[in-house]
Image (spheres, grey):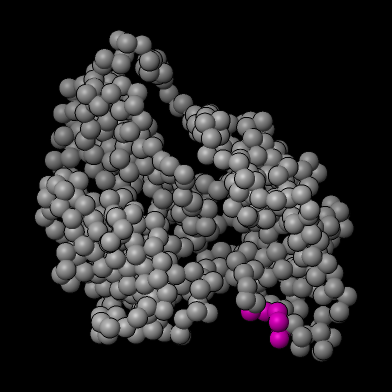
């Protein structure tokens, strides 16, 4: 959204977010992210606006004002100098005071001056050897004394690393609960005079003040419809104004809506037309009310009879989620998830401790439910996949913990007895294992039952991410890469307007995972070159 350069649009985006938060009963939005994109390799850089501190500050201010006009608190983050996402708790950002103040702190200072966010969130990293959540220069001297901030300061999730150091530095709230460094440890610190009661009282007052502000009389939930024609039009406008035109020497763009252009044949080349990247990965990844693939949008614009599609080659890092899933019995979209105290396969008569349908793609057991289960618990998730076409289909499975998958009532993928070595970053905050695969010949319309069983053993996690059990199942039609390139060239030569779309996916840009280089995913460059060799007038979208 930073590419819009529009304060007005960011204010209206903030309004929509404020409405949605009120509609869902949410009192605090953990946004905006104003970290500077000092490097385009940062995994969660997509959350931020810009590499420019002034532009970032002005856009963030408008965004915050829009949110808080609806009585919802904005929590600006990550304070400060959050330059990388992978292992950021180990990151020590060394800089001069001038660099800190003129670059990294400037967006926060502008936002505080122009919008007054109700809360600040500290970053995971250290600055000149001191973790941000324990940095009195940052939280006391600059934020409160110099800038006059009187709101709440909270840590990022599992970004509190101490008791006395953090509270004495000005960290009011450890997130998330239940606490690790407060509670009994805080009681001991007060009794041994590591922390004064006055410091505790001050932190408590800051927490209570925020609670009072967001729960004031007259701030009932917003009961209007947020998914309106007006809001959809605004979102579309923001997306359109965020697009950057790099080159248009032959004036091929824009494509017109004239009858003559609508009658042309358009070639849609690249799997991104069917598997679009809607956002980066991690905590900022959300489920929209609806989504329209680029292929569906082109059908709407010119009609399916005027389109030719070929995927060319895949560029995703991990198998894309399967969308044609429905719950057994009800037929609703998604999975039926059941949680047991014993392995349901070894104990077929065991009753679930908890059962819930979900339309989410990822099976992820939130830490808020852990108190309901024994220390060791099992998850069984069931769904039915309906094949779209007759083809050879590949299922890909990865897990945080241990898991196995049955497909069409056959043992298909085993990540229970062994798991492949981890050779690169993985989805879900880099917590999941590498994928294992299972190939199956499917027939169009065939309904294939799928069952996933998980157990919360050997879960990886740590500071900055939850120790939660998760299973991820994706899938795609198997393609021959060389044949895909030949098909792409054939389409590019045959149609009136060839359009090639490729680039990064959610798993290439994700929280707790930084890229190592700026190259496109394997195969993407060859796909673009193949299409342009076949038709120099092709449109390239990245």
**Closer to the camera in the image, 442 or 482:** 442
**Closer to the camera in the image, 495 or 210:** 210
Identify the residue shown where x is 43% and y is 54%. 516
Residue 489 screen position, x and y as percent: 18, 30
| Above or below, comparing residue 379 to residue 438 in the picture | below
Look at the image and tell me whether residue 534 can be seen: no
Identify the residue shown where x is 24% and y is 59%. 384
| Above or below, comparing residue 474 to residue 39 in the picture | below
Residue 104 screen position, x and y as percent: 69, 50
Q: Is residue 301 magenta?
A: no
Magenta segment boundaries in residue numbering: 180-185
Left or right: where does residue 127 sit relative to residue 354?
Answer: right
Q: Is residue 183 magenta?
A: yes
Q: Quadrant of the N terminus?
A: top right
Left or right: where does residue 34 sit relative to residue 431?
Answer: right
Specify the quadrant of the image occupied by residue 81.
Answer: bottom right
**Closer to the camera in the image, 395 or 522:** 395
Identify the residue shown where x is 48% and y is 52%. 285
Residue 459 screen position, x and y as percent: 42, 77
Q: Main secondary structure of the magenta part?
A: loop
């Amino acid at each position: 959204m930073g590419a819009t350069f529009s304060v007005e649009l960011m204010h209206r985006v903030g309004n929509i977010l404020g409405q949605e938060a009120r509609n869902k009963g949410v009192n605090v939005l953990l946004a905006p992210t104003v970290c500077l994109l000092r490097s385009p390799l940062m995994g969660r850089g997509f959350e931020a606006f810009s590499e420019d501190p002034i532009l970032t500050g002005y856009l963030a201010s408008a965004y915050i004002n829009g949110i808080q006009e609806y009585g919802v608190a904005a929590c600006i983050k990550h304070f400060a100098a959050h330059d990388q996402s992978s292992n950021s708790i180990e990151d020590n950002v060394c800089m001069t005071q001038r660099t800190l103040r003129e670059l990294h702190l400037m967006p926060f200072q502008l936002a505080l001056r122009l919008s007054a966010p109700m809360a600040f969130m500290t970053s995971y990293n250290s600055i000149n050897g001191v973790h941000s959540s324990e940095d009195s220069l940052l939280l006391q001297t600059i934020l409160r004394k110099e800038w006059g901030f009187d709101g709440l300061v909270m840590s990022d999730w599992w970004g509190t690393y101490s008791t006395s150091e953090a509270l004495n530095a000005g960290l009011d709230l450890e997130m998330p609960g239940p606490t690790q460094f407060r509670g009994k440890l805080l009681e001991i610190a007060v009794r041994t005079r590591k922390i004064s009661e006055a410091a505790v009282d001050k932190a408590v007052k800051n927490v209570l003040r925020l609670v009072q502000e967001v729960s004031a009389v007259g701030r009932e939930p917003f009961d209007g419809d947020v998914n309106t024609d007006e809001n959809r039009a605004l979102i579309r406008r923001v997306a359109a104004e965020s697009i950057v035109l790099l080159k248009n020497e032959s004036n091929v763009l824009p494509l017109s809506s004239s009858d003559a252009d609508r009658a042309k044949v358009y070639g849609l080349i690249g799997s991104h037309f069917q598997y679009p990247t809607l956002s980066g990965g991690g905590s900022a990844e959300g489920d929209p009310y609806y989504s329209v693939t680029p292929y569906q949008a082109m059908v709407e614009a010119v009609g399916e009879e005027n389109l030719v599609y070929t995927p060319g080659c895949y560029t995703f890092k991990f198998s894309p989620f399967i969308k044609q899933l429905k719950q057994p019995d009800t037929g609703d979209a998604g999975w039926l998830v059941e949680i047991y105290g014993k392995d349901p396969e070894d104990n077929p008569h065991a009753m679930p401790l908890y059962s819930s349908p979900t339309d989410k793609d990822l099976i992820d057991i939130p830490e808020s439910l852990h108190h309901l289960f024994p220390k060791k618990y099992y998850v069984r998730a069931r769904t039915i996949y309906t094949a779209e076409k007759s083809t050879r289909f590949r299922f890909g499975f990865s897990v945080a913990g241990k898991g196995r998958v049955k497909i069409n009532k056959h043992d298909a993928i085993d990540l229970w007895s062994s798991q492949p070595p981890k050779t690169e970053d993985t989805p879900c905050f880099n917590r999941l294992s590498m994928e294992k695969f299972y190939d199956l010949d499917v027939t169009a319309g065939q309904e294939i039952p799928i069952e996933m069983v998980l157990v919360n053993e050997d879960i990886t996690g740590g500071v900055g991410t939850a120790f939660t059990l998760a299973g991820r199942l994706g899938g795609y039609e198997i393609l021959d890469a060389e044949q895909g390139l030949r098909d792409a060239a054939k389409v590019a030569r045959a149609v009136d307007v060839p359009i090639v779309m490729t680039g990064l996916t959610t798993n290439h840009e994700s929280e707790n995972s930084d890229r190592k280089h700026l190259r496109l995913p394997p195969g993407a460059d060859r796909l673009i070159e193949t299409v342009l060799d076949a038709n120099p007038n092709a449109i390239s979208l990245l």
